[in-house]
Amino acid sequence: MDAEKTGKLISSLRKEKNMTQQQLADQLYVSDKAVSRWETGRGFPEITVLEDIASLLDVSVAEIIKGERIEGAISTKDMESITDDSISISRQYVQQKRRGNILTGFLAGVILLIIAITHLNSPIYFGDPDEIIEIRKMDDQMIVAVLDEKVAGYEIEDSIFEETDSRYSFISCYTTRMYDWFGRKEKKLAMLDEGSDFIYYYPSEEGDKLIWSNGKNSPGGVTTLPRLVYNYWILLAGLCSLIGIVSYFIFRKKYFAQILLKITLIPVSLLVSMLLILSGHFGEIYNAAYYFSGILLLSIVIYVFLMMLLEQRKKQKIRN
């Protein structure tokens, strides 16, 4: 295998076709620098593009590997040499891909495992407190919440309203997928503040719900910030997707346009996954962490699927 001979052959065949290095690169979806390296003998085409190069230049793969035109039948010696070179190229490519695939697979596996564990342990808040929580006021004025066995955990937030100088305790109860599968079913007891004026449970389908009071008026609701954040994310992902798609059609160099398209598929995947997961559930966006991890998992699946379609389309265009 002689890289210089192969480079000179590619160069002469390209010129016979009246093609520039950039034009050949565009048809192969590589950079013009890659073609320049091949033609100067500073690099050798990967085995994945050898067939495409031969097809575009109207020669055989054997001639590209040998670095010269083959007239008539191939001799036994030439066949052995071409076979050995082909095996060598294949072995180098397999070794490079194997190292890359092992590293990529390991990193992807770690990321997916972390996201999956996060998703399974993310809180899923109960919408109706009447089924899972009971508020009791003890003799010493301590207020406690008895939680149903469905509850994996709870969160208590105290707030002081300056206008009325009153203190309010908000309790929210949640489960998780992991708890539903492996959790111990037992009742839980949440100790709340002594002498609290109000106890609110949230979120609920109707908004904040007053479940115990001391005869005073409710201070009002709580802003559903996560819902607003997701709306902004959808707009941002849509804007990035639109900018990327428009830029893809503007780029003249197909190699860089392909790179841009692969980057653009990230916000596209995120946008599609958000719309799929959040569709019909915008009243439950209090489950921010649970939805976020689910969106990430689905985005990865959609991105891999779109990349497979992109690679298949690219190969079809080269062969056509």
Image (cartoon, rainbow, N blue to C red):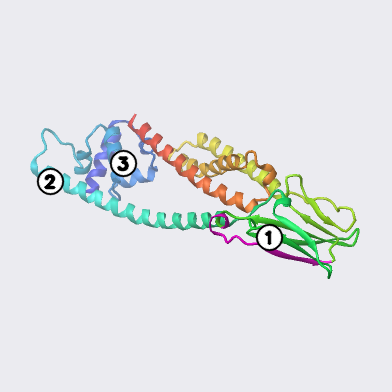
Q: Which residue is mark 2?
A: 80
Q: Which residue is mark 1?
A: 154
Tag of residue 203: none
Q: Which residue is mark 3?
A: 49
Q: CA distance from mark 3 to mark 1?
A: 58 Å
Residue 66 forms part of the magenta stretch: no
Q: Is residue 228 left or right of residue 304?
A: right
Residue 269 vs 216, above or below: the answer is above
Q: Give residue 178's quadrant in the image.
A: bottom right
Residue 181 vs 6, above or below: the answer is below
**Residue positioned most to the bottom:** 140
Q: CA distance from mark 2 to mark 3?
A: 22 Å
Q: Nearer the viewer, mark 1 or mark 2?
A: 1
Q: Earlier in the sequence, mark 1 or mark 2?
A: 2
Q: Which residues are magenta?
A: 179-194
Q: Position of residue 283 (x, y in %)?
A: 70, 43
Q: Is residue 207 left or right of residue 243?
A: right
- Helix, strand or loop under label 3: helix
Q: Give residue 180's quadrant in the image.
A: bottom right
Q: Quadrant of the C terminus?
A: top left
Residue type at tag 3: Val
